[in-house]
Amino acid sequence: MEKTFIMVKPDGVQRNLIGEIVARFEKKGFRLVGAKLMQISTALAEEHYGEHKDKPFFGELTGFITSAPVFAMVWEGENVIATARKMMGATNPAESDIGTIRGDFGLTVGKNVIHGSDSPESAEREIGLFFNESDLLDYNKDQNQWIY
Ligand code: DAT
Ligand code: MG
């Protein structure tokens, strides 16, 4: 089954949105397979956001993501990568649809509450950066017979 990396960013943690965000993914029918509250090092931030290293906002982005704890998660389910991106909304909350996480809780692109992998390749890479294989649990969830 497909897995993706989702992270409540420092603004989301400070604004008490962990529970709200976890609830949305739970209610959608996805299964949480790993999670941790952590503070990201500069080295990990620069690696995670490596694709943006030449962008003018790279320093602001890595500074922000390392500024306070984040809540890192791995979620699993059919089409979870693309569906999670839809649930998050557009990168800039000013353009995110209302009803999405960024559309409901964010105002500015620099503090847009949540990260989610954008492709199978980035999901595999990002899960590997943040979690050990042994951190991810494979367990039975009885709800699945009512979802699939
Ligand atoms: P996403 O997080 O939707 O995958 P992205 O990968 O293009 O978006 O950018 C990563 C993060 O960088 C994004 O969540 C917020 C920040 N960012 C993107 N564009 C920005 C900009 N123009 N100014 C400031 N921060 C920006
Ligand atoms: Mg991205």
Image: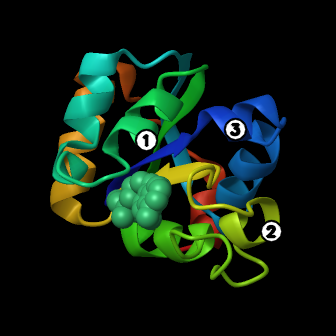
Label 3, label 1: how many angstroms apart (C-alpha)? Answer: 12 Å
- The residue sitting at 50% across, 15% down in the picture is 39
Which residue sits at x=52%, y=33%? Answer: 64
Return the x and y of residue 114 as percentages of the image width and height.
Answer: 58, 51
Instruction: Decide if residue 51 is on the left or right side of residue 73.
Output: left
Q: Are marks 3 and 2 in contact (CB under 8 Å)?
A: no
Residue placed at 78% from the left, 78% from the top? 99
State the residue in front, 53 or 56. 56
Secondary element type, mark 1: helix
Disc 1: which residue? 61
Image quarter for residue 80? bottom left
Q: Which residue is drawn at 38% across and 50% down?
A: 57
Q: What residue type is labelled 2?
A: Asp
CB at mark 1 closer than 8 A to ligand 1?
A: yes
Residue 127: which disc? none
Q: Does the residue labelled 3 lie within 8 Å of ligand 1?
A: no
Label 1 and label 2: CA atoms lie apart by: 21 Å
Question: Horizontal placement of 76 versus 92: left or right?
Answer: left
Vertical placement of residue 51 versus 48, above or below? below
Q: What amino acid is found at the position of numbered circle 3 in the picture?
A: Asp
Q: What residue does disc 2 label?
A: 104
Label 2: how many residues lie within 10 Å, few (<14), some (14-19) or many (20+)? some
Mark 3 vs mark 2: in front? 3
Foreground mark, 1 or 2, reads 1
Instruction: Locate the N terminus and report the quarter of the image it occupies.
Output: bottom left
User: Residue 93: x and y, percent?
Assistant: 65, 70
Q: Can residue 78 be seen in this view?
A: no
Q: Is mark 2 on a helix, strand or loop?
A: helix
Up/down of 2 relative to 142, above or below: below
Q: Where is residue 126 in the image (x, y as percent from the top left)?
A: 27, 41
Give above or below for 75 relative to 36.
below
Nearest to N terminus: mark 1 or mark 2: 1
